[in-house]
Amino acid sequence: MSYFDLLAFQVYPYIALAVFFFGSWVRFDHSMYTWRSGSSQMLSGKWMRVGSNMFHVGVLVVLGGHLVGLLTPHSVYSVFITTAQKQLLAMVVGGIFGVICLIGLLILLVRHIVNARIRATDNFRNVLILVLLLVQLLLGLYTVFISSHHMDGSVMVVLAEWAQHIVTLRGGAGELLADVHWVYKAHIFLGMTLFLLTPFTRLVHIWSIPISYLWRPYQVVRRRQPTLNYGPRQP
């Protein structure tokens, strides 16, 4: 194992996660009014709904798949599905929703670059995050192509072992990734970097998932009654 593997995949994940959690708490505590997605829909609604919906649907499925696939121990899912079948499922679902997310992200990125009103009120951090997400998506889709060359699922087991080592604070995580393809390493490293940058960018709104909408009571909307005309006031 090289020093790079040790620093990038054993030490750096804890730095990134510490900044992610602590930095998000500090921002919420000291800059609550900046805790927002910074939507540009009021400036221009063109292609906003399509791009945003495609991006968010795609990214939610992809992130959910990563969490379940990486953090579920092999002994749990091996009862229901083989390692090879799990990899094939991940490739199909991840590939489909990764493409959906990519199309939505490209629409949003083009809006930020082409639309003059959005560009005038934009900042460097917003564009940087979109570009980093684009690179991350392309790397993720490229892993699907690389995975097609080894359909036994052995690499996915290694990647899951790495994630579980990090979450359970075990040593030796860097050694697990020493021999995997560079695209997996780049994908993981950039993913950790996005966690690191989250408290300082619009990505912080991922904490504000509107789960309460599921049990929030319906709003009763009443029509405004016309003003009653009682005639001139009597002396």
Image: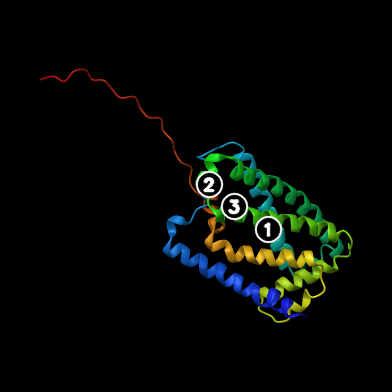
In which quadrant of the rendered view does residue 147 lie? bottom right
What residue does disc 3 label? 127
Q: Is residue 227 above or below residue 182?
A: above
Say if mark 3 contacts mark 1, CB within 8 Å: no
Where residue 17 sits in the image (x, y, percent)? 60, 70
Where residue 151 sits in the image (x, y, percent)? 88, 62
| Foreground tag (2 vs 3) | 3
Earlier sequence position, callout 3 versus callout 1? 1
Could you tell me how far apart the alpha carbons at marks 3 and 1 are, in whole angstroms?
21 Å
Furthest-left residue in view? 235
What residue does disc 2 label? 39
Where residue 9 sits in the image (x, y, percent)? 70, 74
What residue does disc 1 label? 63
Q: Is residue 49 above or below residue 213?
A: above
Could you tell me how far apart the alpha carbons at marks 2 and 3 are, in whole angstroms?
13 Å
Amino acid at pointer 2: Ser
Tell me the tag on residue 25. Answer: none
